[in-house]
Amino acid sequence: MKMKITPLTAGFAIILCATLSAQAPRESDLAIGRVADVWITRTEQLVVPAAEAMPEELYPFAPTAGEFTGVRTFAEQVKHLAAANHQLASLILGEHPPAGTANETAPVSVQTKAQVLAYLRGSFASLHRAAARLTRQNLEDVIVVGRDTQTGIGVIIDAVAHSQNHYGQMVEYLRMNRIVPPASRQ
């Protein structure tokens, strides 16, 4: 899982720095985790309702027209996103992701819409717990991510950016099925 610098990632880093500099010195120790948690919440508020909006009978949907050969189904998109969240959070938490979670893939037991949603919600809960662990003191602590190294905030940014990427794909799948994404209904 190598982090790519995207406009979202750069914007997140700029807002993080601006927020930290605006904090009172005694509050700044926990500010990093709070800001990261806000971004996790914002992403969760897009992704979870989008996953809820797709009817269960369309969870196996994958586009076939055009250049879509071999793409993930809607369910696979959501499970992949959630598995990555679990794995990234586990790096910060020093825990193992849920049993059967490996290589950004959910356990085979996660099949129904209800199971996928529970697994997805659990992945965001793990990211929230991971964000709560971030402080100014451990900001630069090295975390091994495969053959690379990262920091805790880098791992969180990776999770948010990755989730946003797959949210965009989920939106496209919803619209292909004539479903307006919840965030667009407001």
Image: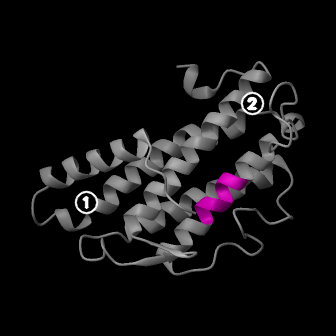
Q: Earlier in the sequence, mark 2 or mark 1?
A: 1
Is residue 83 within the magenta segment? yes
Which residue is found at the position 37% from the left and 55% from the top? Answer: 36
Callout 1 crowding tier (Cα within 10 Å): few <14, some 14–19, many ≥20: many
In the rendered structure, find residue 31 and report the number of the disc placed on it. Answer: 1
Which residue in the rendered view is the most extreme toward the left? 25
Q: CA distance from mark 2 to mark 1?
A: 36 Å
Amino acid identity at mark 1: Ala
Residue in the foreground of this view, choosing between 57 and 170 = 170
Task: Identify the magenta region.
Answer: 80-86
In the rendered structure, find residue 82 and report the number of the disc placed on it. Answer: none
Q: Main secondary structure of the magenta part?
A: helix
- Scheme of image coloration: one colour
Determine whether the residue tagged by mark 1 lies in a helix, strand or loop. Answer: helix
Quadrant housing residue 120: bottom right
Residue 117 point in image, percent of width and height: 72, 50
Amino acid identity at mark 2: Tyr
Determine whether the residue tagged by mark 2 lies in a helix, strand or loop. Answer: helix
Is residue 178 within the magenta segment? no
Picture layout, residue 2 above or below residue 150 = above
Give the residue number, with chain letter if any, for mark 2.
173
Callout 2 crowding tier (Cα within 10 Å): few <14, some 14–19, many ≥20: many
